[in-house]
Image (spheres, helix red, strand yellow):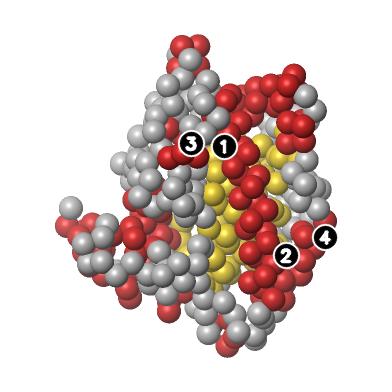
Amino acid sequence: MTDLSLPILDLSRLDAGPDEAAAFRDELREATHRVGFFYLTGTGVGPELENRLHTAARAFFDLPEADKLAIENLNSPHFRGYTRIGGERTQGKVDWREQIDIGPEREPVTDPDAAAFHRLTGPNLWPAAQPELREVVTEWHDKLTEIARVLLQQWALALGAEADHFERHFGEPASLIKIVRYPGTTEPEPQQGVGAHKDSGVLTLLWVEPGKGGLQVEREGEWVDAPAVPGAFVVNIGEMMEYATQGYLVATNHRVISPRFPDDRISVPFFFNPALDAALPLVELPAELAAQAKGVTEDPSNPIHSLFGENALKSRLRAHPDVAERWHADLLAARASS
């Protein structure tokens, strides 16, 4: 591993006795303090489940265009379903990818006085032509939720808090799964698969198709490649963990460069987030850690909110302007006038 490589952490060390568990927590704290990203092995997610997910993802993107567009996210005020190539934006620029967004399966919030971010609550759009997708995604969601909860407990302990510090304020998670395909490009210059950004929530577990690169992480002012590592997830923290630790843990910019045609790339990020109306309380850090906290990043174009729902709505309105214009013109108008 070179100095600019991402750290590799082994989750199974938690089962190897108290000394190994303490060493894992030290590495977890250090990785997310200095880098905000790491590889995670030893999760118990086996190749059989990975292969089923990969096969299902490929099968979805191989569906006829009409079957994919039958669940296009333009039909969902909750930003669920299929986004066609070029249908999403990062920092105002088109992302060259197609995807399906899958969140918690819930009834829409109909209270007219509910906070605006509750518009993100609602049902998913599932492809009628591929009923098996829902089964494997549900299994994937449940397994990764277990891993995410373990990581939250370990972060809390590593930061000097009680193990349930984050979870007891989490509420019903507003998790999100994206199944993404990055098509190849013939352009001579590197193209934006997804532009530079920070995740708006708490924790992301990313599965990348074996043998594929393209993900880059900003570290020490450089873009560092983070290719797929067999048997490992790429893990990063989001803006809410930076907020909760007042900048001791850092949310880090990352991007994806499009593959070269005829190659393409499948990836499946799992975003583990608190309830939309949940605010993570600040962690009372030990003095030696608090002295190293840099404060929350201040960016007028990307304010970090204490409520997850406000962060999530901000991101969705920006990323999917066509959905926003169709279903949430009132919110766009209010933001334009403020």
SS label for mark 1: helix
Asked whether residue 216 is in view, the answer is: no
Between circles 3 and 4, the one closer to the viewer is 3
**Circle 2 is placed at which residue position?**
53
Q: CA distance from mark 2 to mark 4?
A: 9 Å
Q: CA distance from mark 3 to mark 4?
A: 31 Å
Q: Position of residue 88 (x, y in %)?
A: 48, 65
**Circle 1 is placed at which residue position?**
152
- Tag 1: Cα neighbours inside 10 Å, few (<14), some, or many (≥20)? some
Residue for point 44% across, 48% down: 171
**Circle 4 is placed at which residue position?**
48
Quadrant of the drawing holding the N terminus: top right
**288 to the left or right of 150:** left
SS label for mark 3: loop
Q: CA distance from mark 2 to mark 1?
A: 25 Å
**Circle 3 is placed at which residue position?**
166
Residue for point 45% across, 44% down: 170
- Tag 3: Cα neighbours inside 10 Å, few (<14), some, or many (≥20)? many
Q: Which mark is residue 241?
A: none
